Amino acid sequence: MTTPSHAYAGRSVLVTGGAGAIGSNLTRALLEGGARVVVIDDLSASSAANVPTEGDLRFVRGDILDPDALSDAFGESPEVVFHLAASFANQKSVEHPEEDLRINGVGILRVLEAAVAAGRPRVVYAGSGCSVYGNDAPMPLTEGTVSTKLDTPYQVTKLLGELYLNYYGEHYGLPVVKTRLFNSYGPWDPPGRYRNVIPNFMWRALHGIPLPLTGDGTETRDFTFVGDIVDGLLRAGTSDRAVGMEMNLAAGREIAIGDLARKINEAAGSRAGVEHRPRRAWDRKKRLLASIDRARDVLGYEPACAFDDGLAATARWFRTHWSRLATDPKFLPPGVDPTALRPRT
């Protein structure tokens, strides 16, 4: 499947959170397609190393809550805005709920206000399919089964973002698309205290540290390679049928966390195995599996990356960037004693 980045040739595009894991991959695809890209990111949860240095790109280092920085980012009148800036993720929101509300709630409000003032570009929202469906929805998760009984502030504010998009779409005629992303992984997704399970597992495995299972290992998630996520976002930015709609971007398959741990240890050449830990209080989802029928129908979306191929690509990226990932405290996974590390490749 060819990523439809060519549809953006010569177009002005704004990516909020463009230095993040998904944002940097999206930005690279846009630049390869010939777009003129502005990225705004305050680098609080990412790194300047993620920002591409080639292509027609302007980087605004700033917070979406800063009116001057946001005005600067919108200054080139973008035709499409991809809103990926967020306070991530569940555990962080439990520990810092007001920060979560400011960035994910007030942040989307200010982006939408700026979009209206800038001439009503299309706004593609990176929502969270892992958040908005609650615990009792039947599998596979379909777009109409949203719940208001959610487990973390992050889940609440990601749904709040969708509600604001509905309002601005109806009241101001802003063309909005609401995507719901599932368990993205791949290159440019670093480890860290509040990061995803795959980069944190990969970091530990490359250090020869046991992988922590907060459950019995049979829990499943719909892990989706970042290249497939980017493909879906790009399609959402150009499809006329997508305007006003919400749709899952996922792989449409379940991977058990225990199997994930085994595969990552194999990819890293680690014999450290796993260790079982208590389940986190807010983590009550036993399974996650998304229906991608709507995205397939509306966008022509079709995930192309086999899970093992995606893990191999992730391992290659980790090894390429290991000197930075292995030593920077920002990338230290939770519960790791840095003084006991013995880096390995």
Image (spheres, grey):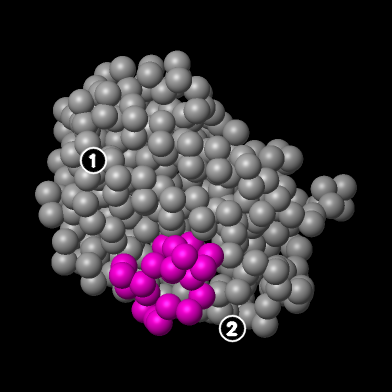
**Residue at image coords 55%, 43%:** 101
The answer to whether 299 appears left or right of 41 in the picture is left
Residue tagged 1: 171
Q: Is residue 98 visible?
A: yes
Q: Which mark is residue 218?
A: 2
Q: Dot 2, how many residues are within 10 Å of its Cα: few (below 14), some (14-19), or many (20+)?
A: some
Which region shows up in magenta?
Answer: 129-150
Above or below, 13 relative to 298: above
Task: Please identify, in this view, whether the residue under mark 1 or under mark 2 is nearer the observer.
Answer: 1
Location of residue 182 by image quarter: bottom left
Overall secondary structure of the magenta section: loop
Report the residue that reaches farthest toward the right. Answer: 339
**Residue at image coords 38%, 32%:** 111
Q: Earlier in the sequence, mark 1 or mark 2?
A: 1
**Residue at image coords 33%, 27%:** 114
Location of residue 258 by image quarter: bottom right
